[in-house]
Image (spheres, helix red, strand yellow):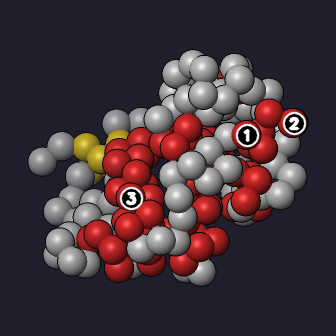
Amino acid sequence: MGKASLELDVALSSEPVFRIASITKQFTAMLVVLAAEEHKLVPDDQLSKYYPQPGQSDWSKITIRQLLTHTSGLPHNEGIADYWEKTSFLPLSDRQATDEIFKLKLLSVPGTKTQYSSPGYFVMACILEKIYHKSYGAILREKITAPLRMDISFPP
């Protein structure tokens, strides 16, 4: 049937669970659109509405729309020291992770350049948790996967 992990020599079973990483960005974007339709947020809300002191002065100007469109100025994971070697393996809480993200140096003034950024989508997921008072997984199940009967895609 194949291997779930070549490195660890683990056989693939009929019930595998894989991390889908950046594929969740589409789900996060859809959840932001739904939250906007429910008047829970406005795409032009500034980050400072949800994080009063997010980072350097330019950070307060970042909007949800800029996070969505990768124009916030936030770097991708390579902006985080030792991300692939060490940091990505640390069991950080959402608060610890956002604290680390808010230490990053912006690559450009928000709204001026496009720069792919996974940390920006992580921040949006945290904003969704704040406005819905639920975990990202619970919001995703309630708003997207349960109505579409995608039970296997995102197990509880």
Label 2, label 1: how far apart the Cα atoms are: 10 Å
Q: What label sits on residue 56 in the rendered view?
A: 2
Judged from the image, the secondary structure of the residue bearing numbered disc 3 is: helix
Callout 2: SS: loop
Mark 2, Cα crowd under 10 Å, few <14 / some 14-19 / many 20+, is few
* 14 left or right, relative to 97: left
Task: Determine contact: label 3, label 2, CB under 8 Å.
Answer: no
132 displayed left or right of 47? left
Rendered location of residue 113, percent (x, y): 57, 19
The CA distance from mark 3 to mark 2 is: 27 Å
Quarter of the image where one finds residue 126: bottom right
Within the image, what quadrant is residue 137 found in?
bottom left
Tag 1 secondary structure: helix
Q: Earlier in the sequence, mark 2 or mark 1?
A: 2
- Residue 104 is situated, as x and y percent measured from the top left of the image, at 78, 33
Q: Nearer the viewer, mark 2 or mark 1?
A: 1
Task: State the count of labels.
Answer: 3
Task: In this rendered view, identify the residue nearer to me: 113 or 146.
Answer: 113
Identify which residue, 86 or 76, lies in the foreground: 76
Direction from residue 150 to residue 72 in the image, left or right:
right
Amino acid type indicated by mark 1: Lys
Any part of residue 40 in sight: yes
The residue under label 3 is 33
Which numbered disc, 3 or 1, marks the residue that appears first in the sequence? Answer: 3
Residue 50 place in picture, x, y as percent: 71, 61
Quadrant in the picture for the C terminus: bottom left
**Disc 1 marks which residue?**
61
In the image, what residue occupies the spot 40% across and 51% down?
29
Residue at image location 67% in from the left, 40% down from the top: 62
Crowding at dot 3, Cα within 10 Å, few <14 / some 14-19 / many 20+, comes out as: some
Q: CA distance from mark 3 to mark 1?
A: 20 Å
User: Which is nearer the eye, 103 or 49?
Assistant: 49
